[in-house]
């Protein structure tokens, strides 16, 4: 087969895959539209669950299975430009994100409602990755239909003098999600292992024991009803270079660039080695790591949306019952 024939064959397969993908997304969209037509809370929940299942069916293998860190995995083996499990196009991925965001907003409100009634279920999302790997974009796109009431975003930078005067988990504990809430960490307590590992700011006798501390900390959170989703965005040096140069050409993005970003870039291999050890030491059954290819931003956003929606769907929550006498309420309202 000639190169031209191979190219035509590839284009044909992509069109067929996109066609199949859109049929599934059309079904999910119809199901989402039908939710409001249900007249009972149970009916709406059943319709929402069906829509969520249809959205998940677009993946040939779920991200939770395919991207979860395994004992024999190496960070350097992950292809940053790949899109494992998703056979559609960028346009298909963006449509998936839009539909999934609608579903996420519904599950978020359900969790918040239950939290107001005493449920301990809540969600902590840990986003890590090299500079310009797309952490901020994920927050904007995945949660674009979410309700600010019930969501908390925290970006962790270099510890302040006050924070350095406390245990390394002190500043993290203050930002944990309340019952029914979602907390999103842009960087996290893992910086307090990776940074001294790379730069030697603390002796190993100080930072290595933190692995076990972190495992205990996260295990206690999960036992108390907090679901933890830890995501590392795997980007390439070339893609990072493109984004850095783009920031220099766009006055509205000047503020994003700091010369220290180049210092970290020069230690790229050291960072990869440090993160590899993090995954090996802290990817647990209760709080696993997911290594998400991130050069295609639409793909990493679709993956994160799928992971979150699937986690919230599996909470199997129901709308709280009315806790007042409706007749008494109507009477006081003059009906």
Image (cartoon, rainbow, N blue to C red):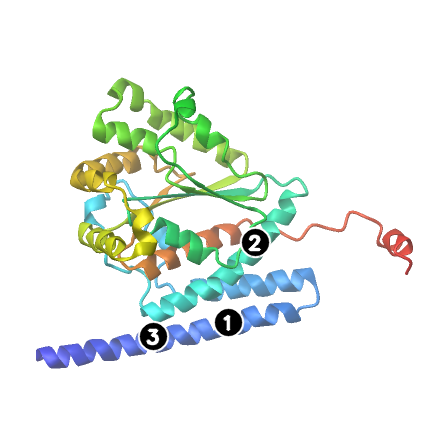
110 vs 333, nearest the viewer: 333
Q: CA distance from mark 3 to mark 2?
A: 31 Å
Q: Residue at label 3?
A: 18
Q: Is residue 209 above or below residue 244?
A: above
Residue 143 drawn at (x, y percent): 48, 55
Q: Secondary structure at mark 2?
A: loop
Residue 246 appears left or right of 106: left
Q: Secondary structure at mark 3?
A: helix
Instruction: Look at 63% across and 63% down and name the residue there.
Output: 44
Q: Residue furthest front?
A: 251
Q: Residue at label 1?
A: 29
Q: Residue at label 2?
A: 147
Q: CA distance from mark 1 to mark 3?
A: 16 Å
Considering only order in the chain, which callout, 2 or 1, is on the residue closer to the N terminus? Answer: 1
Residue 61 drawn at (x, y percent): 35, 59
Residue 325 drawn at (x, y percent): 85, 50
Tell whether label 2 touches label 1 (CB within 8 Å).
no
Q: Is residue 123 visible?
A: yes
Residues packed near mark 2 inside 10 Å, few (<14), some (14 to 19) or many (20 plus): few
């Amino acid at each position: 087969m000639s190169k031209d024939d191979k190219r035509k064959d590839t284009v044909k397969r992509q069109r067929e895959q996109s066609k199949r993908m859109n049929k599934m997304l059309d079904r999910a969209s119809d199901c989402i539209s039908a939710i409001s037509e249900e007249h009972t809370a149970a009916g709406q929940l059943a319709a929402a669950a069906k829509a969520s299942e249809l959205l998940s069916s677009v993946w040939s293998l779920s991200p939770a299975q395919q991207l979860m860190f395994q004992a024999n995995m190496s960070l350097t083996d992950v292809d940053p430009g790949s899109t494992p499990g998703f056979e559609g196009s960028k346009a298909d991925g963006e449509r998936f994100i839009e539909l999934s965001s609608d579903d996420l907003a519904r599950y978020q409100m359900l969790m918040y409602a239950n939290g107001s009634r005493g449920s301990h279920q809540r969600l902590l999302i840990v986003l890590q990755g090299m500079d310009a790997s797309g952490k901020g974009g994920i927050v904007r796109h995945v949660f674009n239909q979410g309700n600010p009431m019930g969501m908390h975003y925290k970006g962790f930078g270099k510890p302040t003098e006050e924070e350095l005067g406390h245990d390394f988990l002190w500043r993290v504990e203050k930002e944990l999600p309340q019952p029914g809430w979602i907390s999103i960490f842009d960087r996290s307590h893992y910086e307090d292992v990776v940074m001294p590992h790379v730069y030697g700011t603390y002796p190993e006798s100080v930072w290595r024991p933190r692995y076990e501390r972190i495992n205990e900390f996260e295990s206690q959170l999960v036992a108390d009803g907090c679901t933890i989703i830890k995501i590392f965005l795997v980007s390439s040096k070339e893609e990072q270079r493109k984004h850095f140069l783009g920031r220099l050409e766009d006055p509205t993005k000047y503020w994003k660039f700091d010369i220290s970003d180049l210092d970290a870039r020069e230690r790229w291999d050291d960072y990869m080695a440090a993160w590899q050890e993090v995954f090996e030491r802290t990817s647990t059954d209760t709080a696993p790591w997911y290594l998400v290819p991130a050069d295609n931003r639409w793909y990493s956003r679709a993956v994160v949306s799928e992971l979150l929606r699937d986690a919230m769907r599996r909470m199997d929550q129901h709308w709280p019952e009315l806790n007042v006498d409706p007749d008494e309420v109507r009477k006081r309202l003059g009906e």
